[in-house]
């Protein structure tokens, strides 16, 4: 989808919104990273105050995918920092959505990748390696499944069951 805003996608697809095939996340995320507009197929991850699995995913080739992390909405520590975001950028990830906090914001904002998170926090996450990969998650009032498509810009974030063209 080339340079089409999320608002235009919504306007062009009211039937998909009614059917639930196109969903908008609640506007709770802060924008980080230099790439304000991004899209790609979704990879899901569910963790809580632990970033080991996030780092493992971002060490893989991204191939234009978007990592969507349900961090339980925790505001007690950061589950994503600057080094993994640099790695994600270098490995071809389009973006990262984190239902939790980030740290090293200056480093993240220097990267050509899209990042959305609830807030920034100076405290590091735990390193236990506990979580679930490729499972349905619910963040910002929206259920998201592995393999769906995510579209993000400064207006918001959309999730679609299929890749959209407008």
Image (cartoon, rainbow, N blue to C red):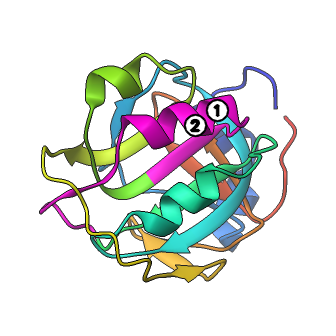
- In depth, the one of 95 and 59 nearer the eye is 59
- In depth, the one of 124 and 112 nearer the eye is 124
Taking the image as shown, residue 71 lies to the left or right of residue 88, namely left
Which numbered disc covers residue 38?
Answer: 1
Q: Earlier in the sequence, mark 2 or mark 1?
A: 1
Q: Secondary structure at mark 1?
A: strand
Tell me which residue sits at (13%, 44%) in the image.
Answer: 122
Q: Which residues are magenta?
A: 73-97
Taking the image as shown, residue 142 lies to the left or right of residue 120, namely right
Tell me which residue sits at (51%, 56%) in the image.
Answer: 55
Q: Position of residue 127 (x, y in %)?
A: 33, 70
Tell me which residue sits at (59%, 26%) in the image.
Answer: 37
Kindly report which numbered mark, 2 or 1, lies closer to the viewer in this rendering: 2
Q: Position of residue 3 (x, y in %)?
A: 73, 20
Circle 1 Cα neighbour tier, 10 Å, few/some/many (<14 / 14–19 / ≥20)? many
What is the distance, in whole Å, between disc 2 and disc 1 at their CAs? 17 Å
- Contact flag, marks 2 and 1 (Cβ < 8 Å): no
- Of the 4 image quadrants, the one containing the N terminus is top right
- Of the 4 image quadrants, the one containing the C terminus is top right
Is residue 129 shown above or below 24? Answer: below
Which numbered disc covers residue 87?
Answer: 2
- In depth, the one of 145 and 115 nearer the eye is 115
Circle 2 Cα neighbour tier, 10 Å, few/some/many (<14 / 14–19 / ≥20)? some
């Amino acid at each position: 989808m080339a340079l089409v805003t999320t608002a235009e996608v919504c306007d062009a697809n009211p039937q998909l919104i009614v059917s639930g095939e196109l969903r908008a996340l609640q506007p709770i995320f802060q924008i980080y990273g230099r790439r304000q507009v991004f899209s790609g197929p979704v990879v899901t991850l569910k963790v809580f105050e632990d970033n080991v699995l996030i780092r493992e995913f971002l060490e893989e080739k991204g191939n234009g995918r978007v990592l969507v992390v349900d961090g339980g909405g925790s505001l007690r520590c950061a589950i994503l920092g600057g080094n993994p975001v640099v790695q994600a950028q270098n490995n071809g990830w389009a973006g990262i959505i984190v239902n939790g906090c980030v740290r090293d914001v200056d480093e993240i904002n220097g990267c050509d990748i899209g990042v959305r998170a609830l807030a920034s926090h100076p405290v590091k996450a735990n390193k236990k390696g506990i979580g679930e990969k490729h499972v349905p998650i619910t963040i910002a009032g929206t259920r998201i499944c592995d393999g769906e498509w995510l579209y993000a810009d400064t207006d918001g974030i959309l999730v679609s069951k299929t890749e959209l063209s407008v």
